Amino acid sequence: MTDEDGGFEGVRENVDGNPIAKLVGYAKPYWLRLSVGVLAAFLTRFARLVPPIIVAAAIDRVVLNSGDPGLLTDAGLLPGGAITGEAAKIAFLQRLVAIAAIAYLVRSATRFASRYLLQSSAQKIQRDLRNDTYDHLQRLSMDFFANHQTGGMMSILNSDINRLESFLNTEFRQLIRVVATVGGIAVVLYTYSPLLALVALAPVPIIGVASGFFLTWIEPRYRSIRQTVSRLNTRLENNLSGAPVIKAFDRYEFERGRVVEQSQQYHDEKVAALRIRRAFFAGLRLLTGVVFVAILYIAGMDFITSADGEAILSAGTFALFFLYLRRLYSPMRRVGKSANKYQLAKSSAERVFGLLGRAPTITDPDEPYTPESIDGDVEFDEVTFGYGDGEPVLEGVSLDVPAGATVGLAGATGAGKSTLLKLVPRFHDVNSGSVRVDGVDVREYGLQSLRADVAVVEQNPYLFSGTVGENIAYGDREVLDGEAAGSASARQRVREAARSAQAHEFVRDLPEGYDTEIGERGIKLSGGQRQRVAIARALLNDPEIIIFDEATSDVDTETEREIQASIERLVEDRTAFVIAHRLSTIQDADTIVVMDDGEVVERGSHADLLATDGEYADLWAAQADEGPVSADD
């Protein structure tokens, strides 16, 4: 899926270097606990090598009464020479038991330490990475959200970051396991028989090379799978959010067909990758089986045909070799699985760090202008703007709005009214011309400073899952903190804002008043109730510039009059822009601006525009002919 279709394939281009190396960079703050965890992991693996050596010593020295010293004797842990007599054998066996007990004790303690330290570090890295990714995502500009689907974003924040945590948690320990086990076994086997050690270790470089080829081969397939699952997540997210529409139009079968199609594509790609993986792992098992058989034949024939004392291996060492072979090839076969996991993790890391490498298009200037307050003068000077590479939506728009004025905007759908006002808080930047607040280009303001004095109430306002009080308190950071803490002053300010927005009456009648949970996106409230809560939220911020983007379109006529009366009082000392669903909403505005096809075609007072008998007069007449406009129109 391309970026234009809402996918995230394009973000990979923002990755500079190996994404797994960037992931490892997140481990730097935890280097001490990781170092101790790695050391403990190596000790765990080395402790696991001790029991087979003890078994070999018991067979040779106790059972067969051989005088072969062995590694434990060379290390000074066991006495040399033949063990004769029952008391000597019992003492020797007790020594073996003590060594085994110490080895298991060390293994248990270091296993706990390594797993706890490494796994907890992986969790911390996951937390930091998700926090940074979310924070960066929130700071990206609006054009990014317009071009990318929510399902794809959720896939990165959840699936991809969880996969990276799993990779760190599991595969890092597997790497230690391979290095410690293969290295330790190689040393032990070479000490007993260099020839058979070389035979046993022959598959190691072959498996390493084969794993490299496997990574190259499987990489494009996993990349395609990640794109497919992102598309599937997006489709599922859209359908779940659009459940009312699907039900209303009875489109169950249609949507099921689209989900089935994408689900089948995901299934086919996963099965194809699974077939490659299984074939690769089967080849590894065949290779290790061949070596096992070869050592069995070579050592067995030498043991049978050699005279006493002349065999390459003693009986105990013969058993040790096969105990070690099982432990040697288990982690080596795991290399193939780790290669598979690495490729999956790399694909996810590309998406995560590609997103982190995506720079916002709207940023603070090098020396941002941050006034203590603004008056609210707004000027549009020959503004031309278009989304992306598309045709201009606005062309040569000029408009001068003094502080405290109320401007109504009218025009057909798609005339550019909402787009024009999105330029004031710098949701987008102009292609040419400029937008100035208090005579300063908005591109020179610090974003936080500018947006702190600009509030927007949209036609379909977004409410968060939570209580009514929390959603209104969202308009002011201090009130929000106080509301969460149960502050009386914060709750009082929330209620005052609700009264100003004509919301207090209906909120008071809710089951739990301001503590009523309103559900996801405020689904438990009507459209008009949601808009009044959004107006209260905006007013709580006490902005100098306030934008009402058809903010009364979903309320009935009586409620509209109530809200309109409140708006008229509230905008007396503020610069206000009101996009009208009903022209009656803006008839008392200081200036009415009529737009058509991205241009200003008329401006003036309600009476003046009616007198000119132009575009506005036609719109007014059309609405008058329709009669009262219902909330559902």
Image (spheres, grey):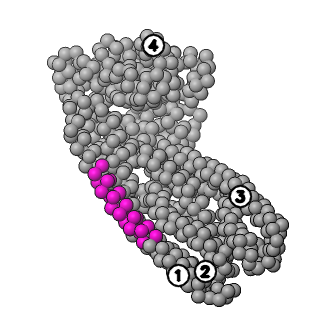
Between the C-alphas of marks 1 and 3, the distance is 33 Å
Q: Looking at numbered disc 3 in the image, what kind of residue is underneath it?
A: Tyr
Q: Secondary structure at mark 3?
A: helix
Between the C-alphas of marks 2 and 4, the distance is 77 Å
- Which of these two is toward me, 116 or 75? 75
Q: Looking at numbered disc 4 in the image, what kind of residue is underneath it?
A: Pro
Crowding near the residue tagged with mark 2, few <14, some 14–19, many ≥20 C-alpha atoms within 10 Å:
some
State which mark lies toward you, 4 or 3.
3
Q: Secondary structure at mark 4?
A: loop
Which quadrant is the C terminus positioned in? top left
Which residue, given by chain and number where applicable, does mark 3 sit on?
104
For the question of whether residue 508 can be seen, the reply is yes
Is 495 situated left or right of 486 in this image?
left
Crowding near the residue tagged with mark 1, few <14, some 14–19, many ≥20 C-alpha atoms within 10 Å:
few
Is 291 magenta? The answer is: no
Point out the stretch of residues depicted in magenta: 263-285
Between the C-alphas of marks 4 and 1, the distance is 82 Å
**Mark 2 vs mark 1: which is more N-terminal?**
2
Say whether marks 3 and 2 touch (CB < 8 Å): no
- Which of these two is toward me, 28 or 331? 331
In the picture, residue 21 is in which quadrant?
bottom right
State which mark lies toward you, 1 or 3.
1
| Residue 297: assigned label | 1
Give the x, y percent position of residue 161. Answer: 50, 50
Say whether marks 1 and 3 touch (CB < 8 Å): no
Q: Looking at numbered disc 2 in the image, what kind of residue is underneath it?
A: Ala
Residue at 26 percent across and 46 percent down: it is 260
**Mark 1 vs mark 3: which is more N-terminal?**
3
